Amino acid sequence: MKTEIAIIGAGPAGLFLGHLLRRAGIDAVILESRTREEVEGTIRAGVLEHWVVALMRELGLAARLEKTADFHDGITLQWNGERLHLDMRDLTGGKFVTVYPQHEVLRDLIAGLLDAGGEILFGVGETALHGVASSDPWVSFRPGKTGPATRLDCRYIVGADGYHGPSRQAIPAERRAEFHKLYPFGWLGILAQTGRSWPELIYANQAEGFALLSTRSPEVQRLYIQCNPDDDIALWPDERIWEELRSRLAVPGWTLAEGPIFQKGIIPLRSFVCETMQYGRLFLAGDAAHIVPPTGAKGLNLAVADVVVLAEALIARYQRNDEEKLARYSETALRRVWKGERFSWYMTTMLHRNPAETDFERRIHFADLDFVRTSRAAATALAENYVGLPFDR
Ligand code: RFL
Ligand code: PHB
């Protein structure tokens, strides 16, 4: 097989890139190790930055989003038993918060790309990268896991295969620097069959720890609580989860809507960056190159931002034979990545109860929150990051 751009991974990064290249008439093939059903069924992110919504509209992929997404003016922060509504539409000159689940975005992107004649091979096995430092790179894989060994020749490889994929490892260890931070807490996330109990997301920092109230639809709610990252989920029967959510989200005169829990799981919280994001003919995008803790709702959005920058650079290369943007891809992408890392770290440290921190540090977090309450400049800084920073090319 032969193509111009071999994309490894059909997550948000790989699929948005597939669309952007297709629109520019550049040939690409996406290789994905999971089945289409698995990709479309994995519950992950929920919040889209304003420009991601605009991009979906521009690509003609927003029909279901218009009908079923939730558009919020802002978010609610809660600490010491009080709530603060941050009106992001007002603070950012009209930008807003969109709650539309990642797996719905992926369904829209996959259907749109296949309808347009795009090529996605699901369920491939043994993906491996070859010759990334040469001018003739290629990817080997087995269709349907156990099919015959197949070779995909290409001009460039894009590693959009998430944190555990093989692409990052194809950059020699001595050519990359990795930055890691593991937080001493995790998130227990649930999906519950019940109605909404508040018109927007609530991020709460209470004595017992962090809680987040989010939504999926008028009938299904998404909630998270801070927990020990090593906890066995069996330690968390439904009644214990509701008890913690009730007390962490409590304010006088308000009740939490409860209902049957039909999905639950625990994730660790980590920050990670790989510098560089390019080597020879290989470019990394999304979680393959960086991870953020979910408190800032940035992971998916950073992944899409990477491929917006990368698509522009590839288009300059193909349409004007201009390689300058491609040569600076990593540098350009990393400037935005580090701002996303900073914001996610700031939201995470400010809003969680860290068992290792002193009372002094805890008071500092409350002062940080109070600064957002009393200063329009501080509130605006938070809002600009949350709805999505402008691109800096
Ligand atoms: P993905 O989505 O992990 O996709 C990578 C794809 O590559 C495939 N793959 C391979 N394919 C072929 N060969 C191989 N050898 C392969 N190895 C792997 C995988 O099967 C997969 O399909 O990476 P991508 O595209 O970079 O996208 C990143 C986002 O998915 C991630 O950052 C977000 O989900 C993070 N995140 C959130 N981000 C937000 O922007 N807003 C949020 O509100 C938000 N909330 C969250 C989150 C992540 C969470 N979890 C579960 C970690 C909430 C949670 C709970
Ligand atoms: C979600 O709805 O899954 C969600 C919302 C906001 C976050 C993280 C996850 O910061």
Image: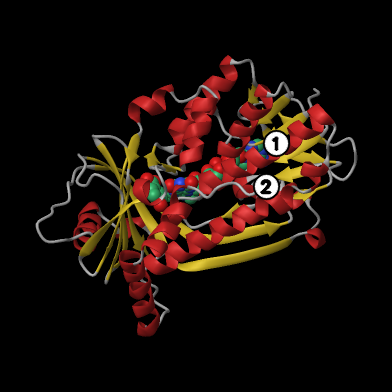
Point 75% across, 25% down: residue? 148
**Closer to the camera in the image, 327 or 226:** 327
Say how the picture is coloured.
Answer: secondary structure
- Horizontal placement of 174 versus 378: left or right? right
| Disc number for residue 302 | none
What percent of the width, then of the height, locates residue 238? 24, 52
Q: Residue flagged by tag 2: what amino acid is it?
A: Arg
Measured as percent of width and height from the top left, residue 313 is found at 74, 38
Q: Is residue 112 above or below residue 140?
A: above
Which quadrant would residue 250 be assigned to in this image?
Answer: bottom left
Rate crowding at label 2 as few (under 14), some (14 to 19) or many (20 or more) other CA atoms within 10 Å.
few
Q: Is residue 178 left or right of residue 65?
A: right
Mark 1 surroundings within 10 Å by alpha-carbon count, few (fewer than 14), some (14 through 19), many (20 or more): some
Q: Which residue is located at x 65 percent, y 23 percent?
A: 23
Label annotation for residue 393: 2
Across and down, in percent, residue 211 comes to 31, 59
Q: Which mark is residue 312?
A: 1
Note whether 308 is above or below 269 in the view shown.
Answer: above
**Nearer-the-camera pick, 199 or 321:** 321
169 vs 301, left or right, is right
Q: How many marks?
A: 2
Q: Mark 1 is on which residue type? A: Glu
Could you say whether the residue bearing mark 2 is in a helix, strand or loop?
A: loop
Question: 257 or 321, which lies in front?
Answer: 321
First in sequence: mark 2 or mark 1?
Answer: 1
Q: Which residue is pictured at 52% across the width and 44% down the height?
A: 300
Per the model, the C-alpha gap separating discs 2 and 1 is: 10 Å
Q: Which residue is drawn at the image coordinates 46% and 65% (left, top)?
A: 346
